[in-house]
Amino acid sequence: MAEEILNRVAQSKLITFNLEDHYPKGERELFDLSKWLLEGFVLKEKDFRDQAKAHHWSQYNDKFIALHCATDAIVPAWAYMLISTYLQPYARKVVIGDLENLESHLYQEVIQQLDVSDFKDKSVIVKGCSNKPVPKNAYIFLIQKLQPVVKSLMYGEACSSVPLYKKSKK
């Protein structure tokens, strides 16, 4: 008679935390200020302000926006601030940086709002693979949030995880 095969992973008390489940829904867009600079490098204030006034800002309604400059131009802080004043009535979130920087900001907000009380003294595995763009910073934010409350933290899949943290027995 064959011995019964047990799925020890399914029977374990591991809790899997998938950052992808907390992916902020919404369209992301990269806004490149270099398009409004003379030859992509020189900011002429009057021309820059004129372009900002004439731009159709409503196209950014309910979007997450990353402001950046694709060239090596030195863009003064006020230029980003000015663009932000135009985006404010429309965009859900505006940050300076690339799309990964935007994702980091979004995840930081999501993770700060998480109630982690259900993870108290539990063994948690942070799922590693995802189909959505989860930035590396999000994993760090999550560790900072979970470590003070969990018994242990691992990364990967239940069948092949990497131990990260284990609370010391006092």
Image (spheres, rainbow, N blue to C red):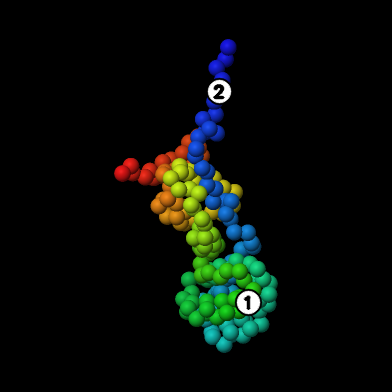
Q: Which of disc 2 and disc 1 is earlier in sequence?
A: 2
Image quarter where the C terminus lies is top left
Displayed quadrant of residue 4: top right
Residue at image x 54%, y 45%? 129
Q: Is residue 57 visible?
A: yes
Q: Residue furthest left?
A: 170
> Horizontal and vertical percent for residue 137?
47, 56
Residue at image x 57%, y 69%? 93
Q: Nearer the viewer, residue 38 or 151?
A: 151
> Horizontal and vertical percent for residue 18?
54, 48
Count of residue discs: 2
Asked if residue 146 is positioned above or below residue 68 in the image, the reply reads above
| Tag 2: amino acid | Ile
| Tag 1: amino acid | Pro
Q: Nearer the viewer, residue 128 or 165?
A: 165
Label 2, secondary structure: give it.
loop
**Circle 2 residue:** 5
User: Tag 1: Cα neighbours inside 10 Å, few (<14), some, or many (≥20)?
Assistant: few
Image quarter where the N terminus lies is top right
> Horizontal and vertical percent for residue 132?
59, 52
Q: Residue furthest bottom?
A: 46
Q: Nearer the viewer, residue 40 or 74?
A: 74
> Horizontal and vertical percent for residue 81?
52, 78
User: Tag 2: Cα neighbours inside 10 Å, few (<14), some, or many (≥20)?
Assistant: few
Q: Is residue 128 visible?
A: no
- Front: mark 1 or 2: 2
Label 1, secondary structure: give it.
loop
Asked if residue 20 is positioned above or below residue 8 in the image, the reply reads below
**Circle 1 residue:** 89
Residue at image x 57%, y 54%? 22
